[in-house]
Image (cartoon, grey):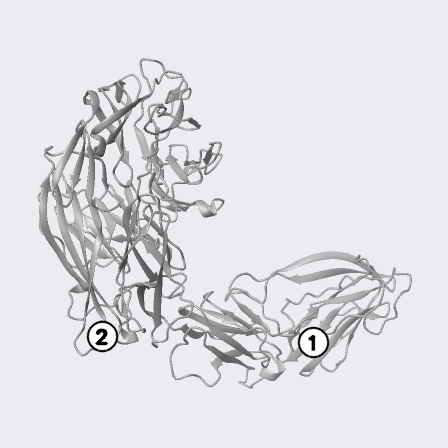
Amino acid sequence: MGHPRRLRLCQATCDPLQPLLKLTMTLYTDNFPYHSVLALAERPRGGFMHHRSSGFLVTVVAVVSLGLMSGCVGNGTPNQEGGGVQNVTLNPNTDVSLDLGNTQTFAATARNSSGGTVFGTVEYSSDNNASLTISTGGVACAGSWDSLTNPVICTPGVAGIANVTATVDGVSSPPTKIYVHQHVQNITVTPINAPADACFSQDTTWDFQATAYSANHVDVTNTVGTFIWASSNVGVLTVDDNKDLANNQIQVTAKAPGVTKIFASVSGTTSVPLDYITCLVKSVKLQVQNGSGNSVTINAGGTKTIVAEVVDTLDVPLSQPPLTWSTSNPEVATVSTAGVVTGRQEAGTANISASCNPPTCNIGIEPGLPIYSTGGTAQNGQPAFGVVTTHVTQAKPPIGTAWTATTDCNNLFDCTSVMFPVTSGNTPIGNGVTLPYTPNSMLFNPGGTHVYLGSDQGLMFVDVTATTLSVSTVSPDTTPCNVAVCGKPLAISADGNKVVVSDTKTSPNQVYIFDAAHATTPPVDLLINGATSAAFSPDQMKIFIQNNEGELLVYSTVDALRSVAVAAPANDVAFSADGSFAYIAGAPEKAVSGIATCDLQDIGRSSPDLTANPLLIFPLPEIREDHIIMSGKTTPEHSVITQNLIALEPPNLQLLTAQFTRDVLDNPAQLTCNPPFFWSDPPNGFHGFAAGSSLNLGQGTFTPLYTKLTGDGSQVIVVAENVPAVLVVDVASGTTSAFPLIDGAVPRAATATLDGTQIFVAACETLAKDDAVPPYERCTSGGAVHIVEPLQGGDIQQVVYTNVNTGDSMCANLDAAHPCTPNLVAVRPQ
């Protein structure tokens, strides 16, 4: 039977009066037919539930099914031929709590030695008829039936405890205990010997008890049986299901920082909720394992562990902190849930940070309350940091592989698009893969395993690591678009799972968030008009989405979609080294500003006026973190982070410096949505921007097709419309190098390896208007992918596609007068 006080789990909102699954059978007892109802309580879902009673079932007035088995249980006699009853089970078989005058239906099942059901006559009995009687059909009355064979009226009896058994051919079931009591009017929940503190630190255990009262506020706790316990937020606490406590008590253990409510229920009545808090996180401090400082260097493929010291509001360290680890550049370095940093295959620099993030940490706080890692002194007396800068070195840069496709089929019925890999060397064109729809965009996930292609018919993706390439789609159907996920991919999360897709064809326009890790789950569907770009915060908790109407909208995994007021239409969003601030390009116009990631409040300061409106913003990966001893302190508890930025404002690149602060809380009352800040700091702890030098690229005002900051932050690569060259800016020296494309080719699209050693430019010699087949601007001659290697002198190879129904054609069934040429290209991250 197991422990009679076994715990089970359910939602806090689980109703003990759940719908019953009814199985109607015909039973003949004493030659009279009765319709038997087998009532099974629907299993509750989610949450936690501690059930210290024999169960809870809605009363059903019915006669129950019964069965016979070979063998015997209880006081029965075994059948030596093996064909009789072996055992009898009673349902419900756990404690039941009944109000005086209420009824409960029982069902008995008898099984033989082979496990098969044997049908026969069931005899039900109660050992306390003053409190509970049970009919021949198995319907119990918390009192007395007017008839045991044809029960209609149940007259209330007296409070007490009765044991019900079912017997078939002399074999009895284990008893089910029934608590008969006055109606429970209300229930209160209180901690036993409550602590002085308002919260419980992780791993702290505490006992709680429930008290049940009748209508006259009479304590009837001892008569109602075992209580069902539940909480509102899963994960904040756990329940000890082996503790031998009274029926009205429970022991819980603080688990993850957060708030929840505890409920107790019995006999259909639920208590007023009691607030419970697992102490919230106060600070997160980082140290390099077996190292010092906030900077490490590892080889490609190498690892380094970062240790996080997490302290709650009672200054108690968490032994199992539920942290979210973040990397500013997942193509350079990844970080595990245990803080293990792994270098990818290309050289570069990434900032590693950690935070206590809902919905797994500081659970139940609304709006969400993330706590970002801060600098200061750890409890071991050594310096700790908010950000650890990781440098990844690579002795020999890997050869890049780009994938290229075209939009030139333009959804024509008889035109089939093909996507190809392209690399430098003697055989630059690899085996292609046929696409079911005309693509409109290409985007790799940071891990480099999948390339996503948007289309008007739905989202496509290809696992480029597979031996045999094939194209998958989100849905086999092309409509409706919120199922097929039509549109253009704008951004992919650092873990590669979530893809943000903008659908500007459907009216009204929508934005979909497809989760590859839960591909069968419908995508998130947001009504956002004309979304043009998106960016994930490093902790992946929020997505900042810009549209063509000047709105900045923020989607959160825990908070409602919000529209953020900005001074002008935002052109781009990027994030600070620790992810706590979002840098906003173009809002206000001709400036860079920012908002706090947590509560989306304006930081209160913007950069000095720039020469032109910035289109893109690139935070440099190298940062400086300084520790300051605050007044009245003996150790550093105040850190200042300085980060340089580059704003693209044609015809210039503008260098900027941002500076912000992080403090450790002095007391829990300072815990707010934003991280704690030094009190004399400006709003949100942001000191503001300082302007550095401005670099003119020498091309006049231009429209960028592609701009990339190399992984180490040393160079900026720019490919612009109608500029037949690749521009490479050296950040340190402020010099610009132009690498012309062969034959004066005009760029259509571009991509580059992380280290900038190879730049792939889809271009053509003649880009002309074509009225016959849209799109109207089409490459009419010289379509190729140009491979530019700055260290080798420039445009070293032109990969030409014959493009007219041959093995290396970008599409099939398009006539020679309108050839398909590459205008989509994306490098696979190594």
Q: Position of residue 509 (x, y in %)?
A: 33, 40
**Of callouts 2 and 1, the N-terminal one:** 1
User: Which numbered mark, 2 or 1, is in the foreground of this view?
Assistant: 2
Pick whichever, 286 or 176, lies toward us. Answer: 286
Q: Residue furthest front?
A: 395
Q: How many marks?
A: 2
In the rendered image, which quarter contains the N terminus? bottom right
Q: Amino acid at mark 1?
A: Lys
Pick whichever, 615 or 655, lies toward us. Answer: 655
Q: Is residue 610 visible?
A: no
Q: Position of residue 651 (x, y in %)?
A: 11, 37
Q: Residue at x 55, y 68 (%)?
A: 49
Which of the numbered marks, if any, corresponds to residue 635?
2
Circle 1 residue: 177
- What SS does tag 2 mark? loop
Q: Position of residue 358 (x, y in %)?
A: 38, 61
Q: Tell me if 328 is positioned left or right of 201 in this view.
A: left
641, above or below 344, in the image: below
Q: Amino acid at mark 2?
A: Thr
Which of the numbered marks, if any, corresponds to residue 341?
none
436, above or below 129, in the image: above
| Disc 2/disc 1 C-alpha distance (Å) | 62 Å
Pick whichever, 357 or 348, lies toward us. Answer: 348
Q: Residue furthest right?
A: 81
In the rendered image, which quarter contains the C terminus? top left
Q: Position of residue 598 (x, y in %)?
A: 28, 60
Q: Residue at x 28, y 42 (%)?
A: 533
- What SS does tag 1 mark? strand
Q: Residue at x 42, y 26 (%)?
A: 431
Task: Check disc 2: other Cα within 10 Å, few if <14, some if 14-19, many if 20+.
Answer: some
28, above or below 129, in the image: above
